[in-house]
Image: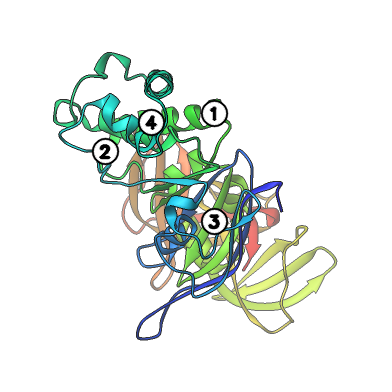
Amino acid sequence: MAQFDVVLEKVNKVFPGGTRAVIDFSVEIEHGELVAMLGPSGCGKTTTLRMIGGLEEVTSGKVYIAGEDVTEMPPAQRNSSMMFQSFALFPHRTVSQNVEFSLKMKGVPTAERARRVAEMIEKVDMTEYANRRPHELSGGQQQRVALARALISEPAVLLLDEPLGSLDYSLRQAMMVELKKIQRDLEMTFILVTHSQQEAMSLADKVIVMSDAVIQQIGTSREIYESPRTKFVAEFIGNNNLFPGVLKSRSGSMALVESNGSTIYVRISEGMKIPPIGREVTVSVRADLIHTGEHPNMGNTVRGTYVATQFLGSLETDVFEVAPGQLVHVEQHRSASERSYRPGQPEVLSWPADAGVIL
């Protein structure tokens, strides 16, 4: 187990009153990975992070850090550090004093403390602010100090609870790059909790998608985005269109699903689990894989009427209604001058058989 920095084995958390906050959570996190736990509020991701750090008791299951069973250990004895969204800096202490605090509590000699603090402050590009206090710093600078303070003890794993949540958009974009750079430079394992898909997909080597206290899917950003395994993941991640239907037949590597009077062809890829014939299923198709207009070389076509366009810079998402209450999003690069749709205008939507995923 020593090859993994963090291992959770069937971890459960039940709060007083019987509320199950985390159910059978199992994962293995390798050294140097940046892992994001992603999901809506109340899904159990923060509770899981706090159990790894020892701030919440584990109801059942095991937590290992750097090969050591820490399930019953208090936070101070675990080889981990935690960075909170609020930063929690000491307002009356300088940057250097905030960063050195944990080393001082451990009795590290003054000269050694000074050397390590100077090195860590330099890593987060805060050397010129070493003697300032938190109220004299911007939000981004305060975050760098909080990060330096969490890293100074050289933990096996750094736990980050919504680390970018309190920053404005432009600063958050810059700090995402900075956080990933620092993590790679230090070759340290980071586990972060976020409700932002962009943060998770941009930063993480591995994404854990949670909902209703359970893991829905674990994979790389690409795997999660391109091959969702459950309806929840398809709805929560990216811009996926869902077509409910019934699995009518399967022939070789091709499955046929009947959805609202249309036949949808899905090429069965490796790892795609296909239920028995006659079972209700949902076909997920990414918005960027659907095309407008007739495309004879594509296996699937549906007809719809234009509803609206969502303008996102160089990308536009056209929305069509293909059945009462069922909207399909088509994402494509197209200049505003080329848009000529009018409300209610009919259009044919097409996509290839290998663009769909059966959930």
Q: Where is residue 231 drawn, in percent x and y? A: 54, 68
- The residue that disc 4 covers is 148
Label located before the other in sequence (3 or 4): 4
Q: In this view, does 356 lie above or below 161?
A: below
* Callout in the foreground (1, 3): 1
Which label is found at residue 186?
Answer: 1
* Callout in the foreground (2, 1): 1
Q: In this view, does 80 lie above or below 26?
A: above
- The residue that disc 2 covers is 167
Q: Where is residue 290 drawn, in percent x and y? A: 55, 51
For the residue carrying disc 3, how many other residues have a C-alpha within 10 Å: few (<14), some (14-19), or many (20+)?
Answer: many
- Identify the residue shown where x is 85% and y is 66%: 252
Whole-Å distance between the Cαs marked 2 and 1?
24 Å
For the residue carrying disc 4, how many other residues have a C-alpha within 10 Å: few (<14), some (14-19), or many (20+)?
Answer: many
Identify which amino acid the numbered label 1 is placed on: Leu
Whole-Å distance between the Cαs marked 3 and 4?
26 Å
- The residue that disc 3 covers is 208
Q: Is residue 170 visible?
A: no
Q: Where is residue 350 drawn, in percent x and y? A: 58, 54
Classify residue 17 as left or right of residue 249. Answer: left
Q: Where is residue 220 drawn, in percent x and y? A: 61, 47
Label located before the other in sequence (2 or 3): 2
